[in-house]
Amino acid sequence: MIPLKTITKPPLNQSEFMTSPSLNQNKMAYENPNKSSNNRIVHMKKCPALIFLLPMLIVLAFTIMVFGAYEIATLFTNPIDATTTSTTSTTRTTSTTSTTSTTTTTTTTSAVVVTPSTATCSSTVATSCTTTTSIVATCQSYEVSWNGHCYYLDGSAGTCAAGYSLATNAVLTCISTLFAGKTYATTTSGNCCIWTADTYECYGLGSNCNSAGPFTSGPTLGGNSCTNAQNHGSKQLTFCGNN
């Protein structure tokens, strides 16, 4: 038999145990188990809520840091503007203008007949002429203005200018004397009996008949033997008034 060798354990050096860092660490871990890293991990495993919230807290802290850094950078890079908000109150005033149009109607009381007549000159009843001086027409130099109308004599053979028509013997009775000093409108007449709107010619021009004017006097009733005449020559003297 092989004899067993007796192993003698060296005595423990207490001073080496106290001075060795690894031994001290083991000793502290043994004496204070709460300070051991293994023990801390064990405690965290015992609290799963802490493990769940820890990543969220890290992300939140990182987000706050990034946002704060952005705000600080914006504060230093953008100039500070002083913005004044001005509120303007606009008052709109609607003005309603009432325009009153006044139409003045002047009624002329006159016995003058303006409707063409078929009566003979001897049957013509003399009537009084009423002149309304408030109505004055703007007429040509060769025309006579009366009651808002313009009248002229011309050798136009019964034709009147545009806007004019044949006037009656009744009107000519009222204004015949006013033609003194006037002239033919365009053409010297070839017959002195005055063609009117009536059937018969009752007035004739005694002065400047068939010759250039101005007339020394106006037409007269029966002048130049113009009584119940119906002369319609190519240059017949014609009496016209505007419409």
Image (cartoon, rainbow, N blue to C red):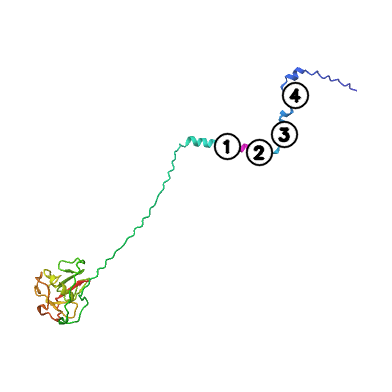
Left or right: 174 in relation to 38: left
Q: Quadrant of the N terminus?
A: top right
Q: SS class of the residue under badge 1?
A: helix
Q: For residue 128, which quarter of the picture?
A: bottom left
Q: Which of the two residues, 130 or 204, is positioned nearer the viewer here?
A: 130
Residue 80's spot in the image, x, y percent? 46, 37
> Is residue 79 shown above or below 194?
above
Q: Choose the circle earlier in sequence order: 4 or 3.
A: 4
Q: Choose the circle earlier in sequence order: 4 or 2.
A: 4
Badge 3 vs badge 2, beta-carbon distance below 8 Å: no
User: Which stretch did the figure color magenta?
Assistant: 53-67
Find residue 125 and name its label.
none
Pointer 2 residue: 53
Q: For residue 229, which quarter of the picture?
A: bottom left
Please state which amino acid type lies under the numbered disc 3: His
Q: Choose the circle earlier in sequence order: 3 or 1.
A: 3
Residue 156's spot in the image, x, y percent? 16, 74
Pointer 3 residue: 43
Q: Residue at x 73, y 29 (%)?
A: 34
Gap in angstroms between the C-alphas marked 4 and 2? 34 Å
Q: How many marks?
A: 4
